[in-house]
């Protein structure tokens, strides 16, 4: 899925190897970075009988998209291609965007549960960028638990999945310098996913764009801070960090509070970074605090 996964655990390496095998299996199923994956084949044929697992993951992705009002959308494939966000990036014409946008319609795909056939409208395609790593982390954690491991840390391209008997401090990096921790939080179990507007960016005519698109209007979003989500489900953390990035701090914080989601926004201001915490990220025992510098919680209603 275009990135690296690390596994940290004590003792014999065998369970880690089994977990890597599981992630490799999911890569073969879900990765659109591989022409031979089951998902790439579905996208090419536009209609196929798929594995029980892929059927379930794609149905879950559509359900999550509906729950976020389309801010998260697993049908962003054609938009990602139009904007070339996996390459050097370009700004398409409004006409080109208007032509492609209907392909992201969440009502387009047909799911027939009896035959497990998934059918896509012509030109539409699933893209796992916003949920594949999260799904793989949930599966890898399940495999490690089946192997009897109770303590481990997985890092898949920056998204963490943790099981620990003692609380562990994890860091959220500066949206601009991934080696500079800005916030610390305490976790024992669950996943931390960050969607950042300053990674994988591209600049056109002096404007910096992120690799995250707003599927509601088909535009690449400007590079603007980051959103982190903590959840027991890595799939949910992955989906919601992307969705809340799309919504932005104002709409996103209200959505997170209405849906009891632990979210942390890092927002650029003239005076430096502002931190906005949803109610749950204040109360879930995460003890969010500054890494070094003074901590200023922004106005919660903004
Ligand atoms: P990361 O890949 O760093 O984990 P995200 O989880 O936010 O970041 O996923 C961003 C990726 O998801 C993009 O590179 C693209 O492939 C895809 N994507 C972009 N915008 C959306 C969106 N609104 N909904 C779902 N997937 C998206
Ligand atoms: Mg992600």
Image (spheres, rainbow, N blue to C red):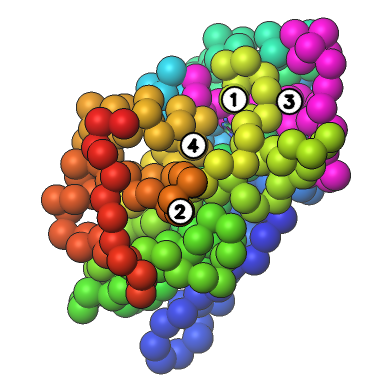
Q: Which residues are magenta?
A: 70-98
Is residue 254 rendered to the left or right of residue 19?
Answer: left
Whether the magenta-drawn stretch holds residue 90 is answered as yes
Give the crowd class for mark 3: few <14, some 14-19, many >=20 residues within 10 Å.
Answer: many
Q: Which residue is mark 1?
A: 214
Q: Is residue 174 above or below residue 98?
A: below
Disc marking residue 245 = 4
Whether pointer 3 and pointer 2 mark residues with C-beta atoms closer than 8 Å, the reply is no
Say which label, 1 or 2, has the lower sequence index.
1
Q: Which residue is mark 2?
A: 272
Q: Residue at x 63, y 35 (%)?
A: 222
Residue at the limit of the structure toward the bottom, as seen here: 11
Give the crowd class for mark 1: few <14, some 14-19, many >=20 residues within 10 Å.
Answer: many
- Alpha carbon of mark 4 to alpha carbon of mark 3: how far? 17 Å
Asked whether residue 55 is in view, the answer is no
Say which label, 3 or 2, has the lower sequence index.
3
């Amino acid at each position: 899925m275009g990135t690296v996964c690390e596994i940290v655990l004590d003792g014999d390496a065998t369970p880690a190897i089994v977990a890597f095998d599981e992630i490799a299996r999911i890569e073969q199923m879900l990765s659109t970075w591989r022409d031979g994956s089951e998902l790439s084949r579905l996208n090419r044929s536009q209609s196929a009988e798929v594995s029980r697992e892929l059927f379930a993951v794609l149905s879950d992705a559509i359900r999550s998209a509906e729950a976020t009002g389309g801010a998260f959308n697993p049908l962003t494939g054609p938009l990602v291609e139009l904007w070339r966000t996996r390459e050097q990036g370009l700004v398409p014409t409004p006409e080109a965007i208007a032509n492609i946008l209907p392909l992201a319609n969440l009502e387009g795909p047909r799911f027939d549960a009896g035959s497990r056939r998934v059918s896509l409208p012509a030109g539409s395609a699933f893209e796992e960028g916003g949920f594949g790593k999260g799904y793989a982390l949930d599966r890898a954690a399940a495999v490690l638990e089946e192997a009897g491991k109770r303590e481990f840390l997985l890092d898949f391209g920056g998204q963490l999945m943790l099981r620990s008997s003692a609380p562990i401090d994890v860091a959220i990096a500066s949206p601009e310098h991934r080696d500079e921790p800005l916030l610390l939080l305490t976790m024992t179990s669950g996943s931390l996913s960050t969607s950042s507007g300053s990674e994988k960016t591209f600049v056109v005519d002096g404007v910096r764009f992120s690799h995250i698109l707003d599927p509601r209007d088909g535009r690449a979003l400007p590079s603007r801070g980051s959103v982190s989500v903590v959840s027991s489900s890595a799939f949910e953390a992955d989906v919601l960090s992307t969705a809340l990035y799309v919504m932005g701090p104002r709409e996103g914080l209200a959505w997170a509070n209405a849906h009891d989601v632990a979210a942390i926004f890092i927002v650029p201001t003239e005076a430096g970074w502002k931190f906005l915490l949803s109610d749950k990220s204040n109360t879930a025992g995460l003890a969010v605090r500054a890494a070094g510098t003074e901590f200023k919680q922004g106005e919660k209603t903004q």
